[in-house]
Image (spheres, grey):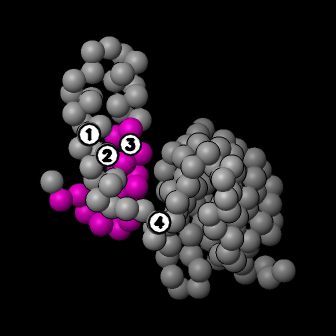
């Protein structure tokens, strides 16, 4: 295996979302902000926060969403076990934008703390999808 790349796999219970050789990556940790990973990184395991995994394949910068799960990092491999994930190409920006607008309304109309937390989670997930798609919110 090359010491200039590492193998990144993003897996959900339903499917393998991504399997690629990457030169670097960053992922959102639940406890430490974003981890930056290069080949030969010290092994670690950490829970994931909702967010975007940023990675490079050659000179191309790419992104994939991640919602919950764990990251297992080794010197030559990173395995992301996520509850949900999608690549930039799989995101329907218009659907994410609609979800964002609906979550804003739900947040505004929430009658209690539990529904506020639910609405905030939906809002954050829609925002992450829109950001990962590379398009800008138009409304």
Q: Are marks 2 and 1 in contact (CB under 8 Å)?
A: yes
User: Which labelled disc corresponds to residue 124?
Assistant: 3
Q: Which residue is mark 2?
A: 99
Q: Secondary structure at mark 1?
A: helix
Q: Earlier in the sequence, mark 4 or mark 3?
A: 4
Question: Which label's residue is closer to the chain start, 1 or 4?
Answer: 4
Disc ID at residue 54: none
Q: Quadrant of the C terminus?
A: bottom left
Q: Which residue is mark 4?
A: 90
Q: Mark 3 vs mark 1: give the one in front.
A: 1
Tell me how far mark 2 sits from mark 1, CA to CA.
5 Å
Find out whether the residues at labels 3 and 1 contact each other: C-beta distance under 8 Å: no
Marks 4 and 3: which is nearer the front? 4
Determine whether, in the image, residue 102 is placed left or right of residue 49. left
Q: Secondary structure at mark 4?
A: helix
Q: In the rendered structure, which segment of residues is drawn in magenta?
A: 122-138
* Kind of element beneath mark 2: helix
Q: Main secondary structure of the magenta part?
A: helix
Q: CA distance from mark 1 to mark 4?
A: 21 Å
**Do callouts 3 and 2 mark residues in contact (Cβ within 8 Å)?**
no
Residue at 73% x, 62% y is 78
């Amino acid at each position: 295996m090359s010491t200039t790349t590492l193998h990144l796999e993003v897996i959900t219970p339903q499917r393998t979302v991504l399997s690629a050789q990457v030169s670097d990556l960053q992922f959102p940790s639940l406890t430490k902000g974003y981890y930056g990973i290069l080949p030969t990184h010290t092994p670690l395991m950490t829970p994931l926060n909702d967010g975007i995994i940023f990675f490079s394949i050659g000179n191309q910068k790419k992104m994939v969403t991640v919602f919950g799960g764990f990251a297992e990092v080794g010197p030559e491999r990173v395995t992301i076990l996520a509850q949900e994930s999608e690549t930039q190409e799989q995101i329907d920006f218009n659907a994410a934008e609609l979800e964002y607008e609906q979550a804003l309304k739900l947040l505004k109309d929430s009658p209690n703390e539990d529904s506020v937390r639910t609405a905030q989670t939906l809002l954050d997930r829609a925002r992450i999808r829109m950001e990962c798609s590379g398009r800008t919110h138009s409304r």
